Image (cartoon, grey):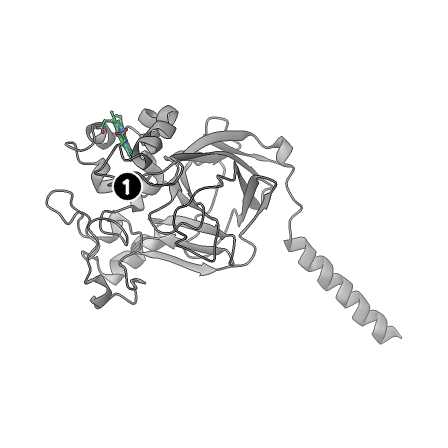
Amino acid sequence: MKKMMTIISTLVLATIATMGTLQAAPDWSKAPAKKMTLLYPGTASLEWTLKGVDHSGAKAMKGGETCAGCHDKEAADVGKKIVSGGKPDLEKTAIKVPGSIPITVQATHDGANLYLRLQWKDTKSTGAPKMDEKNQVKVAMMIDAGKVDYADVGGCWASCHHDLRTMPDVDKNAPNHAKAKALDIRKNGPTKYLKESRTSITNKEHPWGGWDKLKSGAEIDKELKEGEFLDIVQYRSGAAPRDGYVLDARRMKEVEGVAEGKLEGDTWTVSFTRKLASAEIGDHKIEPGKTYHIGFAIHDAYSNERHHHVSLGHSLALDNAKADINAVKQ
Ligand code: HEC
């Protein structure tokens, strides 16, 4: 009997311990809400945005002006122009996707975890071909801790290059490169990378970008240790969520519990949970008193690869009303 009781109490303790790691759901009604617009960017890569003859924002960007500073209020118009074929250097013809998706972002924390929630109305698009049969929706967020070039100016644009898979200057021979496997280059080319991982990138002569100008493994490892990467988490409606980082390539693996989502009525709700003091490689520690750069992307209506809607760069901080996204403690 005594042994039985011990087993039972051990089981009870084990259950309580597991429950302890499952956090109580945050009270979202108390979390400040930030509205933003995710726009369809076409092939507007970092290289394109930095090319003065193509983009009049280029010069100011080099001086530190942010994409949001110039485009925040008219992000929906930019997307509309691109999907309607009004910007043929970014999308050759009109396409059947919405120009933009308005979203609401909320964030909160409890001293141990950061919770972030996105909501938007299902776009019920579209008639566009299904590119990713398995996932009706995918949502990603990327966070910079202040060490990645252009992340302060353009959020996700720091990782978006003209020679990525499905982009105009992709190298058809990339899958034959000696490092193709290590960089997860499959049949259609490289994934996101940062300028920090390359000896140079260019937007002078085509091809733009610099996917094959890799720095040495030792240099890249050092950058990773020093926090020069974008921390990425991804929700997928038809598969497990993924967690990882972007530096020399986009490196993600399936991790249960980092994201969840649902479509209720006509509203999608996707939330992310992550440890503030994570020691995982590729996770930034999220600390009080620091400001982070953050960007979001939604792959809507079974879309894939470059065919997503993206936010301009925004700021994130804990208990700081000056940040675009202020995670207030509960
Ligand atoms: C100093 C202001 C400024 C900044 C900063 C800026 N832009 Fe622009 N952008 C413009 C202007 C003005 C245009 C319209 C004329 C043109 O195409 O040059 C434009 C055009 C665009 C277009 C094409 C759509 C259109 O309406 O013609 C896209 C896409 C775009 N910008 C994206 C970005 C992104 C992404 C960033 C940051 C990485 C950025 N811009 C930074 C001013 C800016």
**In the picture provided, is 13 more to the left or to the right than 38?**
right
Residue of label 1: 149
Across and down, in percent, residue 136 comes to: 48, 51
Across and down, in percent, residue 92 comes to: 24, 41
Q: Is residue 91 above or below residue 278?
A: above
Q: Is residue 285 above or below residue 329?
A: below
Residue 289 visible from this viewpoint: no
Q: Quadrant of residue 51?
A: top left
Residue 292 visible from this viewpoint: yes
Q: Quadrant of the C terminus?
A: top right
Across and down, in percent, residue 14 comes to: 71, 63
Choose between 40 and 312: the one closer to the eye. Answer: 40
Across and down, in percent, residue 204 comes to: 11, 42
Q: Is residue 50 above or below residue 239?
A: above
- Is the residue indicated by label 1 positioned so its CB lies within 8 Å of ligand 1? no
Q: Quadrant of residue 78?
A: top left
How many residues crowd around disc 1 within 10 Å: few (fewer than 14), some, or many (20 or more)?
some
Q: Is residue 203 above or below residue 66?
A: below
